Image: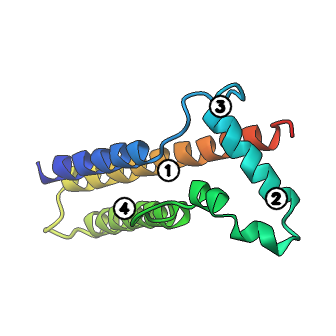
Amino acid sequence: MVDRVDIQSVLNQMQNLRSQMQVPESANPTNTQFANTVEQMRKQISSAEQPSSLTDNSVQDSVTPKGNVPSFGEMFKDAVDTVNDNQKVAGDLATRYEMGDPKVDLPEVMIALQKSSVSFQAMTQVRNKMIEAYKEIINMPL
């Protein structure tokens, strides 16, 4: 029953991460706020060699996160570390069960292996979505 709570907490963490990632509902250039943000970013990139463009507060405020928000890299690294830890624990339990450790029972090993598998599949799906988003951004017309 304890493992179900762990799985539920993993699902809650995934839902929290999904709610924190606020993507515009449509990436259509007719959306004025999205179009303005893209245009500001284009201006910033095109005038990157001019130091005066770096002091434009409106562009910096629209791009930088506010508050105590961890960076995407930190969140992704934490997720990968969690998946790695799950796989290590599952492998260790399986090895201990195979060696005949009386403290480890088969259901515990199977639940740990399933938990490891689910977390790895979730991470793979996140990676696939990231690659898909990257390709979409790269293929956007300037």
- Note whether 9 is above or below 79 in the view shown: above
Neighbor class of circle 3 (other Cα within 10 Å; few <14, some 14-19, many 20+) is: few
Which residue is at a point 70% across and 70% down the rendered structure image?
55
Q: Nearer the viewer, residue 54 or 136?
A: 54
Q: Are marks 1 and 3 in contact (CB under 8 Å)?
A: no
**Rendering coords of residue 70 (x, y %):** 45, 65
**How are the colours assigned in the image?**
rainbow
Q: Which residue is mark 4?
A: 86
Residue ID for mark 1: 123
Amino acid type, label 1: Met
Q: Secondary structure at mark 2?
A: helix
Measuring from the top left, give residue 112's x and y in whole percent. Answer: 29, 55
The residue tagged 2 is 45
Q: How many numbered marks appear? A: 4
Q: Is 111 displayed left or right of 28 in the figure?
A: left
Nearest to N terminus: mark 1 or mark 4:
4
**Could you tell me the amino acid type at mark 4?**
Asn
Of the numbered discs 1 and 3, the one sitting upstream in the chain is 3
Give the mark nearer the N terminus: 1 vs 2. Answer: 2
